[in-house]
Image (cartoon, grey):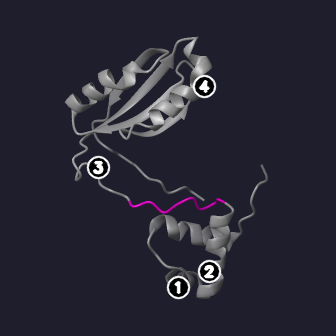
Amino acid sequence: MRKLAIDQIDRKILEILQREPGINATAIGDQISLSQSACWRRIQRMRDEGIIRDQPVKLDREKVGLNTMVFAHVKLTSHGRSNLAAFSEAVSEFPEVLDCYVLLGNVDFLLRIVTRDIKAYEMFFFEKLSQLPGIQEVNSSIVMSDVKHTTILPI
């Protein structure tokens, strides 16, 4: 995989896009003293190269009724580890799972899960997550409050 080159102007554009996802190329250009067309070309190049993957809408999970967030550490059986891809594919289908990471260490996966409440998490756990083959252990940690949550990378 080749490393993609981004210069200081690209970095400024990326910082602005992370802070203000809906901003247009004209407004970005005004902030960094670059023409709209030059700014648009840079943004398009970074999209084409995969540096910019998408511009998500950020929702307040509690305001849409998703009051419970859980981090689940999942350990697979030794037999289950041969099916890491199958587990990854299965949890990717669960809308409750926002993030899934493969880890090195004493657990295999870290999942970030949101549900309406603890009862909904219990149903998700017993009806979906624990039904997947190869699971040895799941340790769930309930989030009490968000201290910091961002998608802004420190570029």
**Upstream in sequence: badge 3 or badge 2:** 2
Q: Which residue corresponds to mark 1? A: 26
Query: Quarter of the image holding residue 93?
Result: top left
- Front residue of 123/154: it is 123
Q: Is residue 103 visible?
A: no
Residue type pointed to by label 2: Cys
CA–CA distance in space, label 3 to label 2: 33 Å
SS class of the residue under badge 3?
Answer: loop
Cα separation between marks 1 and 4: 44 Å
Label 4 and label 2: CA atoms lie apart by 40 Å
Mark 2, Cα crowd under 10 Å, few <14 / some 14-19 / many 20+, is many
Q: Which mark is residue 61?
A: 3
In the depicted structure, whether residue 98 falls above or below residue 82? below
Task: Provide residue 36's location: percent of width, then percent of height.
Answer: 58, 86
- Answer above or below: position of 58 versus 23: above
> Seen in the image, is 135 located left or right of residue 70?
right
- Residue 53 in magenta? yes
Q: Which mark is residue 104?
A: 4
Q: Name the residue carrying label 2.
A: 39
- Residue 132 place in picture, x, y as percent: 43, 21
Identify whether 53 is placed above or below 109: below
Stretch in magenta:
50-57
Q: Are marks 1 and 2 in contact (CB under 8 Å)?
A: yes
User: Which residue is at 65% across, 59% downward?
Assistant: 50
Q: Amino acid at mark 1?
A: Thr
Element at label 2? helix
Q: Height in image: 70 above or below 33?
A: above
* Circle 3: residue type: Arg
Task: Indicate which disc, 4 or 2, sits on the residue closer to the N terminus.
Answer: 2
Position of 65 with respect to 95 (left or right) is left
